[in-house]
Image (cartoon, rainbow, N blue to C red):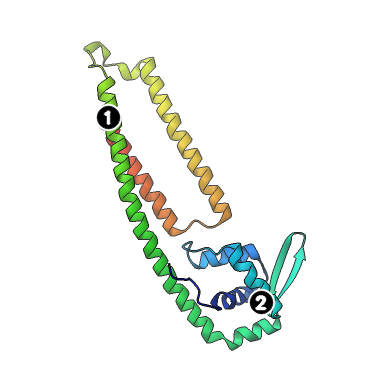
């Protein structure tokens, strides 16, 4: 994949992010992730060396409180931004193009993954149906109330507990990820597609 930022562009964009208010390094990483709609998030190893260079050049000042460092733009940094406003506008245009390119790539990956997932789900459902047909007995007239028997109720309860456990696990994972960084539109679309396909496959299995 081609680089997201051209040489020197990320340092300039960090100055722009600090123009509105001082920020911690994590807040800068989060702001960049949001600007890219979740399609790109820089690593700490990408951000902090550039912040250190900006501080060395007098464009950024730091203030430490415990283990956290706050970065703020200096007067020299503001002057640098003013001098390079047109270049910053070009960076914004480049970011917009990068977001579109990354989103297109993610959509292509999702489509490919969905095709594979649908094939896997179909194979799993067919295997389950085959197993059920092999092990099932032909019900007699007296067995028509099997669904209401203790065994039928036990199986139904087990299936409901599996669904409940799955829902709880996914909800916990979503909340954990949401606390770390915003859920991107692409991630939401992936969740929706996977759940829709799982719903269809489960219904088909139950009706067969």
- Residue drawn at x 40%, y 69% is 100
Query: In this picture, is 94 found above or below 30?
Result: below
* Quarter of the view holding residue 97: bottom left
* Residue 49: image location, x then y, percent: 64, 70
- Helix, strand or loop at label 1? It is helix
Q: Considering the image in quadrants, where does the C terminus appear? A: top left
The x and y percentages for residue 165 are: 48, 34
Residue closest to the eye, 148 or 180: 180
The residue closer to the viewer here, 188 or 124, is 124
**Closer to the camera in the image, 9 or 178:** 9
Which residue bears the numbered disc 1?
129
- The residue beneath circle 2 is 54
Residue found 53% across the figure and 78% down from its top: 7
Q: Position of residue 26 (x, y in %)?
A: 63, 62
Q: If the image is split into quadrants, where does the N terminus sit?
A: bottom left
Instruction: Name the side, left or right, on which 183 lies relative to 133.
Output: right
Using a 10 Å C-alpha cutoff, classify the residue at mark 2 as few (fewer than 14 neighbours), some (14 to 19) or many (20 or more).
Answer: many
Instruction: Kindly report the distance in space between the C-alpha atoms of the residues bearing marks 1 and 2.
Output: 63 Å
Counting every numbered tag in the picture gives: 2
Of circles 1 and 2, the one toward us is: 2
Which secondary structure lies at badge 2? helix
């Amino acid at each position: 994949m081609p680089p997201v930022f051209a040489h020197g562009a990320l340092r300039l964009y960090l100055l722009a992010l600090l123009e509105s208010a001082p920020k911690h390094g994590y807040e800068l990483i989060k702001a960049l992730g949001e600007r890219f709609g979740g399609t790109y998030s820089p690593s700490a190893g990408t951000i902090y060396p550039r912040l250190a260079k900006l501080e060395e050049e007098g464009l950024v000042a730091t203030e430490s409180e415990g283990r956290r460092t706050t970065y703020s733009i200096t007067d020299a940094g503001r002057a640098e931004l003013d001098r390079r406003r047109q270049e910053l506008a070009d960076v914004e245009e480049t970011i917009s193009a990068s977001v579109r390119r990354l989103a297109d790539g993610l959509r292509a990956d999702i489509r490919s993954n969905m095709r594979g997932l649908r094939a896997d789900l179909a194979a799993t459902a067919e295997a389950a149906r085959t197993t059920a047909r092999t092990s099932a007995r032909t019900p007699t007239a007296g067995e028509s109330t099997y669904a209401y028997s203790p065994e039928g109720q036990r199986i139904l309860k087990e299936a409901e507990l599996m669904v409940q456990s799955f829902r709880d696990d996914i909800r916990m994972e979503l909340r954990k990820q949401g606390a770390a960084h915003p859920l991107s539109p692409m991630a939401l679309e992936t969740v929706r597609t996977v759940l829709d396909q799982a719903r269809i496959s489960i219904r088909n299995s139950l009706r067969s």
